[in-house]
């Protein structure tokens, strides 16, 4: 009997709801959130503090981009992916609670968030992608996960207040411009696991010094770039 009623029922529903029903996915839409199949496509609200609904698995491309009101965001534990430019250009965003199950941070996810003060990257993230935190001019504290393997091009470029950062022992790659224009950066310790450092990943000036094992790629890079070197 239900099958005979299905066409009539579907005619009364929006296309998005029909797709969600057929796919068995979550559909959630109000004046603030637009989500389908576990993907939050857009946040349309104007709240200073935003708590993303439980059940969302993906923060879609540009979902919060250029939102001028949001200051704090809390992601539920169900989120495992933040796509490209998800929070790009949010001028008042200060704090973000990332899901402990997060494994992917997209390119430019927080680029241009000039008020962002601190961030803790969850343990499942192995790559900081291109321009992820570029031009986060107020960023002072970054906690990187122990399993981080690579920091991509320009990931933290323009983070002018970042003074120190602890690099995990497994880190192998720091690409070009990763910490370019980080004028406040002081001594950084790079372990022997770092085998590639791209052009201008760090630039000389201020109090910057690289602490590295003699004969390592990091020590060679410091000498090449005329950055103060402390060996151990």
Image: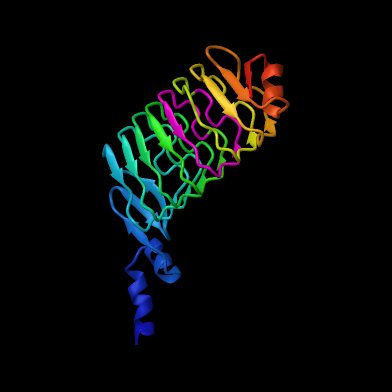
Horizontal side, residue 46 vs residue 226: left or right: left
Q: What residue sits 45% from the left and 52% below the top?
A: 101
The quarter of the displayed image where residue 87 is located: top left
**Is 133 part of what is drawn in magenta?**
yes
Return the x and y of residue 134 as percentages of the image width and height.
50, 29
- Compared with residue 57, is residue 217 higher up or lower down, i.e. above or below? above
**Is 184 part of what is drawn in magenta?**
no
Return the x and y of residue 170 as percentages of the image width and height.
60, 41
Camera-nearest residue between 189 and 96: 189
Horizontal side, residue 14 vs residue 157: left or right: left
Instruction: Report if residue 46 is visible in the image.
Output: no
Q: What residue sits 46% from the left and 41% below the top?
A: 121
Q: Which quarter of the rendered picture does the N terminus lie within? A: bottom left
Return the x and y of residue 173 as percentages of the image width and height.
64, 36
- Compared with residue 218, is residue 35 higher up or lower down, i.e. above or below? below
Bounds of the magenta segment: 132-158
**Is the magenta region chiefly helix, strand or loop?**
loop
- Compared with residue 178, is residue 223 higher up or lower down, i.e. above or below? above
Return the x and y of residue 135 as percentages of the image width and height.
48, 25
């Amino acid at each position: 009997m239900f099958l005979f009623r299905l066409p009539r029922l579907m005619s009364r529903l929006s296309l998005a709801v029909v797709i969600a029903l057929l796919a068995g996915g979550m559909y959630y839409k109000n004046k603030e959130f637009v989500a389908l199949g576990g993907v939050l496509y857009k946040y349309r609200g104007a709240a200073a503090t935003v708590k993303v609904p439980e059940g969302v698995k993906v923060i879609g491309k540009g979902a919060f981009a250029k939102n001028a009101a949001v200051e704090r965001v809390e992601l539920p534990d169900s989120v495992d992916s933040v796509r490209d430019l998800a929070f790009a250009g949010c001028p008042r965003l200060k704090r973000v609670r990332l899901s402990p199950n997060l494994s992917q941070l997209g390119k430019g996810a927080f680029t241009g968030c000039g008020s962002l003060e601190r961030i803790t990257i969850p343990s499942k993230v192995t790559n900081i992608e291109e321009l992820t935190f570029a031009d986060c001019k107020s960023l002072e504290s970054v906690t990187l996960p122990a399993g981080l393997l690579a920091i991509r091009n320009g990931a933290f470029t323009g983070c002018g207040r970042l003074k120190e950062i602890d690099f995990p022992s497994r880190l192998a790659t720091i690409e070009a411009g990763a910490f370019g224009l980080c004028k406040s950066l002081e001594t950084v310790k790079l372990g022997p696991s770092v085998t590639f450092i791209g052009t201008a990943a760090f630039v000389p000036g201020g109090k910057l010094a690289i602490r590295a094992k003699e004969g390592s790629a990091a020590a060679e890079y410091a000498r090449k770039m005329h950055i103060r070197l402390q060996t151990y």
